Image (cartoon, rainbow, N blue to C red):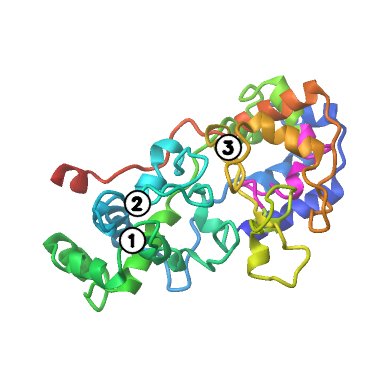
């Protein structure tokens, strides 16, 4: 769906060149234009959750994954769970500059949000994970993360009658296996979808859903500032990798996987902008404290070097334009957070 939305956006963007004042009024409650329909197609929310290769997730897959996601039994000390770093109350991140592993060690990278993660594969700041199923055991077994071996985890789950019953009811082989753990965790994470935001209501025709400054910010976002070239589609990401002029030294992102590629050196995954105003600090390394600082970075153009994306160049925005962009980005935050911890496991502790 991300590709489809992205392709729709490219077609619309190629056809539509609208002055800022015109775009500001394009979503008026009355007289919706063909251009407005184009933007709806480009940024409209999907109606279905992606289906993995193994077939649709079942309610049992999702519920088992939810139990595992919030259970600290997945860590050696039984002190942290997946949700410790991907906290629903923090928009499925941790709000830190860098992630913290079980031994209290600060990691090299910021914890990414899981919002809309089912649509934006490959995963990881460098894209080393082809899909959600392939992610789970890297943090679980990582010495600086949850630090628990696959065998120890499976033994722990087999010692818990509730998990024995849950796996038996969920999978044909009735067994607790690595593949089953991966599938269940991925199934739950595919349900972590950002809620309806003021921008979505405006996109649907509610002219009062966002203010004049935010409307002007959308015109900049899709016009002079060209933010939508990377942050397109309903999740506001192209799911790709770019050097935007951050990262130094050995912190080379996707370039580590493709060492002969000049363009992928210092390239990191484009994050979703959903709920972005609540998810600082920013960038893969948490090096940019506020969203206004992010706008200033793009306005400057970041570090100039051979790998820097040709899309990144100084914007020369005015202070008013920067304020308008910020106002627009704030309209991407949903009023309701996605699902939280399951009651059964919480009550059992």
Q: Residues within 10 Å of mark 3 (few under 14, many from 20)?
A: some
Q: Which residues are magenta?
A: 219-237
From the viewer's perspective, is residue 233 above or below residue 307?
A: above
User: Which numbered disc covers residue 342?
Assistant: none
Q: Which residue is mark 2?
A: 103
Q: Quadrant of residue 2?
A: bottom right
State if disc 2 and disc 1 touch (CB < 8 Å): yes
Relative image position of residue 267 (x, y in whole percent): 69, 57
From the viewer's perspective, is residue 324 above or below residue 140?
A: above
Q: Secondary structure at mark 3?
A: helix
Q: Which residue is mark 3?
A: 276
At horizontal 57% and vertical 57% (from top left) the residue drawn is: 120
From the viewer's perspective, is residue 200 above or below residue 81?
A: above
Where the N terminus falls, by quadrant? bottom right
Q: Earlier in the sequence, mark 1 or mark 2?
A: 2
At horizontal 45% and vertical 68% (from top left) the residue drawn is: 134
- Give left or right: position of 139 versus 157: right
Relative image position of residue 236 (x, y in whole percent): 64, 46
Q: Which residue is mark 1?
A: 147
Is residue 225 on the magenta stretch?
A: yes
Residue 25 visible in image: no
């Amino acid at each position: 769906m991300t590709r489809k939305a992205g392709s729709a956006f490219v077609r619309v963007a190629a056809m539509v060149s609208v002055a800022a004042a015109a775009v500001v009024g394009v979503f008026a409650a009355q007289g919706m234009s063909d251009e407005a329909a184009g933007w709806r197609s480009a940024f409209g929310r999907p109606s279905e959750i992606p289906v993995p290769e193994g077939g649709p997730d079942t309610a049992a897959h999702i519920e088992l994954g939810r139990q595992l996601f919030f259970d600290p039994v997945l860590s050696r000390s039984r002190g942290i769970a997946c949700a410790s770093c991907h906290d629903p109350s923090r928009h499925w991140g941790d709000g830190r500059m860098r992630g913290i592993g079980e031994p209290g060690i600060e990691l090299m990278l910021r914890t990414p949000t899981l919002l809309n993660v089912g649509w934006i594969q490959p995963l990881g700041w460098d894209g080393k994970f082809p899909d959600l199923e392939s992610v789970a055991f890297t943090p679980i077994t990582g010495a600086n993360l949850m630090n628990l071996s696959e065998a120890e985890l499976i033994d722990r789950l087999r010692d818990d009658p509730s998990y024995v019953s849950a796996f038996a009811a969920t999978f044909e082989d009735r067994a607790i296996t690595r593949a089953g753990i991966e599938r269940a965790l991925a199934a739950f994470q595919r349900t972590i979808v950002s809620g309806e935001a003021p921008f979505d209501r405006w996109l649907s025709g509610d002219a009062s859903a966002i203010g004049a400054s935010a409307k002007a910010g959308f015109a900049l976002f899709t016009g002079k500032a060209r933010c939508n070239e990377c942050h397109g589609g309903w999740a506001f990401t192209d799911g790709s990798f770019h050097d935007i002029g951050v990262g130094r030294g050995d912190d080379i992102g996707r370039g580590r996987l493709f060492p002969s590629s000049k363009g992928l050196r210092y390239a990191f995954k484009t994050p979703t902008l959903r709920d972005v105003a609540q998810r600082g600090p920013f960038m893969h390394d948490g090096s940019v404290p506020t969203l206004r600082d992010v706008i200033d970075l793009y306005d400057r153009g970041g570090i100039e070097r051979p790998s820097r994306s040709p899309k990144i160049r100084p914007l020369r925005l005015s202070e008013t334009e920067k304020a308008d962009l910020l106002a627009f980005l704030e309209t991407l935050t949903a009023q309701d957070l996605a699902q939280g911890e399951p009651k059964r496991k919480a009550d059992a502790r």
